[in-house]
Image (cartoon, rainbow, N blue to C red):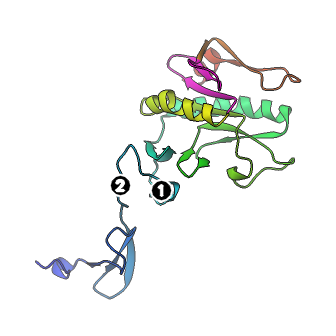
């Protein structure tokens, strides 16, 4: 059997002029029509070496790809409980932020690139407006009022131990980690060494001129179960 193709009627593989680390190879089928098949890019060491360009070249395969100081974080699709909790929280925060004014509430997937080696996709985040208008790209505003992650077993380590430091260093006033099974919210602020763990009733008070947002954690999780 020849590696150059033809056997069993399969298309032949022919690499383009670029070396084999190209993102694509060209397939030639027997009738001469060419088409492209996506091939994986070279995978750097998991603890370093990734850039935004490399992350953005990854396939749209249902995973969430994030970058922390050159380290690639990969999260699979979330559970139904995760999504119900996220949407319930979104409804509450969105309505409050509309009353607050000057901000908008968004949910993943949406990239928040802090630098060429840092890009996160919070489950939910609150973004300031720029001169009263919504920005087209995060880089136009470059900051968040709030970032929120709803825990899943596959993301708990990253959400709890890697992301707090990033949000603190980027000056995000509050980062919440919502834990549905535990019925609690962990709150990180820039100066915190440990999170404030809240059960029962949780309050967010981003502006002194407005009353706080009150979240009944137990009621929210009960609605989602």
* Residue at the image point whose x is 44% and y is 44% from the top: 71
Q: Secondary structure at mark 2?
A: loop
Q: Which residues are magenta?
A: 172-195
Q: Is residue 202 above or below residue 206?
A: above
| Quarter where residue 37 is shown | bottom left
Q: CA distance from mark 1 to mark 2?
A: 16 Å
Residue at image mark 1:
60
- Outermost right residue: 209
Percent across and percent down for residue 127 are: 73, 41
On-image quarter of the C terminus: top right
Is-magenta flag for residue 174? Answer: yes
Is-magenta flag for residue 82? Answer: no
Q: Secondary structure at mark 1?
A: loop
Percent across and percent down for residue 113 are: 60, 48
Q: Does the residue at mark 1 contact the one at mark 2 (Cβ under 8 Å)?
A: no
Q: Callout 2 environment at 10 Å: few (<14), some (14 to 19), or many (20+)?
A: few
- Sooner in the amino-acid sequence: mark 1 or mark 2: 2
Q: Is residue 191 above or below residue 102?
A: above
* Residue at the image point whose x is 59% and y is 38% from the top: 122
Task: Name the one closer to the observer, 194 or 136.
Answer: 194
* Residue at the image point whose x is 36% and y is 65% from the top: 39
Relative placement, left or right, of 52 versus 6 is right
Residue at image mark 2:
43
Relative placement, left or right, of 82 versus 112 is left
């Amino acid at each position: 059997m020849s590696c150059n193709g033809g056997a069993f009627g399969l298309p032949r593989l022919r690499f383009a002029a670029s070396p084999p680390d190209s993102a694509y190879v060209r397939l030639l089928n027997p009738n001469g029509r060419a088409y492209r098949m996506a091939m994986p890019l070279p995978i750097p060491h998991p603890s370093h070496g990734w850039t935004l360009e490399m992350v953005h070249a990854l396939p749209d395969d249902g995973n969430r790809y994030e970058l922390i100081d050159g380290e690639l974080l990969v999260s699979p699709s979330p559970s139904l409980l995760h999504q119900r909790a996220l949407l319930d929280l979104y409804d509450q925060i969105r309505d409050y932020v509309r009353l607050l004014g000057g901000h908008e509430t968004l949910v993943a997937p949406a990239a928040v690139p802090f630098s060429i080696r840092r890009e996160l996709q919070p489950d939910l985040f609150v973004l300031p407006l720029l001169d009263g208008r919504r920005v087209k790209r995060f880089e136009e505003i470059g900051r968040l009022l709030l970032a929120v992650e709803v825990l899943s077993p596959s993301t708990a380590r990253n959400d709890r131990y890697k992301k707090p430091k990033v949000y603190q260093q980027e000056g995000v006033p509050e980062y919440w980690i919502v834990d549905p099974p535990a019925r609690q919210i962990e709150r990180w602020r820039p100066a915190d060494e440990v999170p404030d763990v809240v059960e029962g009733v949780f309050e967010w008070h981003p502006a002194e001129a407005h009353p706080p947002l009150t979240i009944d954690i137990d009621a929210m999780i009960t609605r989602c179960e």
